[in-house]
Amino acid sequence: MHTEPDYSPDYIFESSWEVCNMVGGIYTVLSSRANSLQKLYTDKIIFIGPDLWDETESPWFKEDDSLLKEWREHADIKERLRIRIGRWQVPGNPITVLVNFDKYYKHKNDIYSQMWSNFGVDSLPSYGDYDEASMFAYATGVVIESYYNYFKLENKKVVAHFNEWMMGMGALYIKHFVPKIATIFTTHATSIGRSIASNNLPLYKNFYEFNGDQMAQELNMVSKHSVEKITAQNVDCFTTVSDITAKECKQFLGREPDVVTPNGFEKGFIPKNKAYVQKQSLARKTLLRVSEALLGHSIADDALLVGLSGRYEYKNKGIDVFIDALNNLRHNKYLKKDTIAFIMVPAWVKDPRMDLQQRLNEPGKANFENPLFFPFITHNLYEPQNDPLLLQLKRLNFTNSENERVKVIFVPSYLNGNDGIFGTTYYDLLIGLDATVFPSYYEPWGYTPHESVAFSVPTITTSLSGFGAWAQKMGDEEGIDDGVEVIYRDEDNYAYVANAIANTLFELSQKSKEEIKEIKNAALGFADLADWEHFIQFYQEAYGIALQNSRKRTLEKS
């Protein structure tokens, strides 16, 4: 669709459950994109997130009582809206509104009835996080309406952008009560697609046989699917993050996205030159020290350090196939270099291991002569006997002994600097790895491999990830020498994927220090192609489409 040059927004409101609330990849999408949007629409881009911070303050939000003071006071006194205004502590520091939505729970049934009457959203079989998400979404719509009316924006070009099914009722509220505002809805993964994959059903083999509504019934996803589908079909512009997910949207939601808005990355905070080398060296030392303390023996300086991270979705993220790949590598008699694989996925963590803390607090390696009991994990878990990762290691007879070339270390804690073992953030460890592996079965985009190459760390991913499919489109070559290896994955080639990962890691282990350096530089080249500098144009296109469709819609009604 052609976008007229004057269809550029005067104001943009963007809302998500993950604004100033780090939960998953959407936080990275929004927080890294904020800087580019601020450059284009300085302080006319306003983010809206949930105010979940009663006893402690969000570490990503800094309140500023002077910002939009008159409107805040009006919203508080006249409309009884409980909001706080400040700036998101990310590059660009955009204006952010945190919304307390508690008061809407007592009106929940009326709100759901209204959504059923106006749009046909079926909230009756809802459960779990549906109520919390919907009350926040509804409150977000009310806050946008309040700002719009207070500042008399009727003659301005205003866009309201809502992310994921959780924000669906906000978009529907705006369409009904403030129809002149142009609405955008982005799904980062369809609820039905993710659920089919998570339930071990053959998503890809039977893709065109699945009916979204029918699967919602079978998978007990009726309400989430209902609000997601109806929002997608009612907004002025519908977007998703990759060509892979666009197919899901058409099949399960009944609307093909107007534009694909791939996820970029903000490279401004990545250290450069001497700072990069220092950070890399420190990260490597940290990873090796924790490993040696846990395993009870020294590790060669040239050991290959490999990582996998993300949500603990065992099949979807490919954790299962990664461990099988490591098992294949372990039995490669030609492997001459130690390989330490760090699986950094938050699980049901109890606390950091006291025995490991004690070793790390002692100087030198005097007590590193014997492994700690169960030297596979850095933190204690609730119900470790039921953990699928640990069960797979046990089934495959991993030992992590000194005479084994391949060791696996499970890091089940959020790496935010307060985990009690590493004492630093994920990014400050990522930079010390030699490679990462993300063999996803279901991955609408894939920020983890994207982040990896941005930090000059070569990565292995699959053709079923949005990032992997994008890399192939951009000319990814076979092998890891260009910094990215995209392994073809389908429903039935699990063993092939495990072997391909093992072979690629073995290939890396054979590389010289200089060759590894060249591969790292090549990885950074891929990251440059996926910077927000290149991808922000797709959001500008989405704004234009939304404003055009909004204008057309309002003209037809007048």
Image: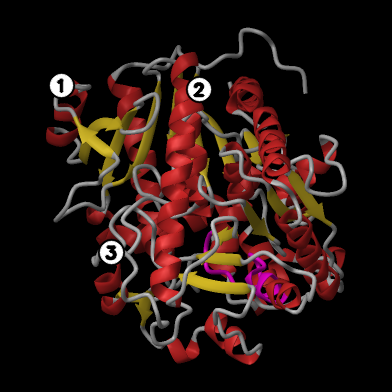
Q: Which residue is mark 2?
A: 36
The percent position of residue 13, horizontal first and vertical second, equals: 43, 30
Rounded to the nearest angstrom, the CA distance separating label 3 from label 1 is 37 Å
Query: With respect to residue 366, does 396 lie above or below?
Result: below
Rounded to the nearest angstrom, the CA distance separating label 1 from label 2 is 24 Å
Query: Which mark, by number, is residue 243?
Result: none
Start-end of magenta stretch: 310-324
- Mark 1 Cα-neighbour bin, 10 Å: few <14, some 14–19, many ≥20: few
Secondary structure of the residue carrying tag 3 is loop
436 relative position to 293: left or right: right
- Mark 3 Cα-neighbour bin, 10 Å: few <14, some 14–19, many ≥20: some
Q: Residue at x 52, y 63 (%)?
A: 311
Q: Which residue is mark 1?
A: 66
The percent position of residue 208, horizontal first and vertical second, equals: 86, 63
Amino acid type at image mark 3: Gly
Q: How is the image coloured?
A: secondary structure
Give 533 or 185, whichever is nearer the viewer. Answer: 533
Q: Residue at x 50, y 26 (%)?
A: 273
Q: Residue at x 25, y 46 (%)?
A: 58
Reply yes or no: does residue 312 show up in magenta.
yes
Quarter of the picture holding the C terminus: top right
The percent position of residue 103, horizontal first and vertical second, equals: 22, 54
Query: Which mark, by number, is residue 420?
Result: 3
The percent position of residue 310, horizontal first and vertical second, equals: 53, 59
Reply yes or no: does residue 241 show up in magenta.
no
